[in-house]
Amino acid sequence: MSVEPEATTMSAAQRPGKIVAIGLNYAAHAAQVGRTTAGRPQIFFKAPSSVIGPGEVIVLPPESARVEHEAELGIVIGRRMRRVTGADALAGVAGYCCANDVSARDIQHAEGLPDYAKSFDTFCPLGPVVPASSVDVADLVVECLVNGEIRQRGRTSDMLYSVSDLLAYITTAMTLEPGDVVLTGTPAGTGPLAAGDTVTVRIGGVGSLTNPVVAATEASRPSSAC
């Protein structure tokens, strides 16, 4: 029986300053969606307001007819980073977590850009966070289960760009601050979610993140702006 490292939870009250996400970091996923991989990491952003914690509900917005799960390893930044080298990058990581880069796929395809389609409220479940010192992320199993059935399974060793590679590349352009989160890309097998589903991201050595899925209701929609 394996023992998971001690973890802390993450909720909307602990939202990161920014969420930097990586697309097409697994060759098999790029092949699944009919895309070729580029010669550098593909960066986009998710709104911090999309963050929810373990057990909180993913709400399917009425604007999308196809919302999909994407299991990912999340990196939680612990120290300010600017132009770090690959060798130094890991020293600035506070912890790692399970992440679900929930995506309104039809909107993403229609717009040709991912940011809006991936930033709906509740579209970034995160947690639990385990200390970086307690886990070696070089070769972890990353899985997504929907209603107990495995939909995605890959390994962090399959990533085209490692954790240190990603941090070095990102901080060439922007400073990463404590509390920021980096999402490292998803393995092949992304697929649709429906109201009533339960989706779990499971990463060996890190833990698991489970969220129920519900349809939007009038009660779950925000009131008009003040």
Image: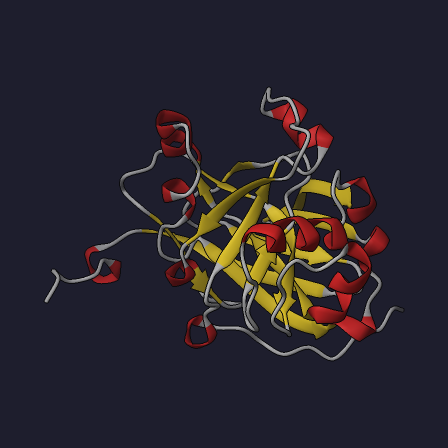
Residue 23 at x, y percent in the picture: 58, 39
Residue 73 at x, y percent in the picture: 67, 55
Residue 57 visible? The answer is no
Q: Quadrant of residue 137?
A: bottom right
Residue 195 at x, y percent in the picture: 41, 47
Q: Quadrant of residue 223?
A: bottom left
Which residue appears farthest toward the right when viewing the image?
1
Residue at 71%, 36% (x, y): give it. 26
Residue 19 at x, y percent in the picture: 50, 57
Residue at 43%, 45% (x, y): give it. 118
Residue at 19%, 56% (x, y): give it. 218
Residue 191 visible? The answer is yes
Q: Identify the image quadrant of the N terminus.
A: bottom right
Residue at 45%, 70% (x, y): give it. 15
Q: Identify the image quadrant of the C terminus.
A: bottom left
Q: Could you tell whether 90 is left or right of 60 in the image?
A: right
Q: Which of 156 and 204 lies nearest the eye of the viewer?
A: 156
Q: Could you tell whether 126 is left or right of 138 in the image?
A: left
Q: How is the image coloured?
A: secondary structure
- Asked if residue 44 is positioned above or below residue 85 in the image, the reply reads above
Q: Which of 100 and 170 lies nearest the eye of the viewer?
A: 170
Question: How many numbered marks are there?
Answer: 0
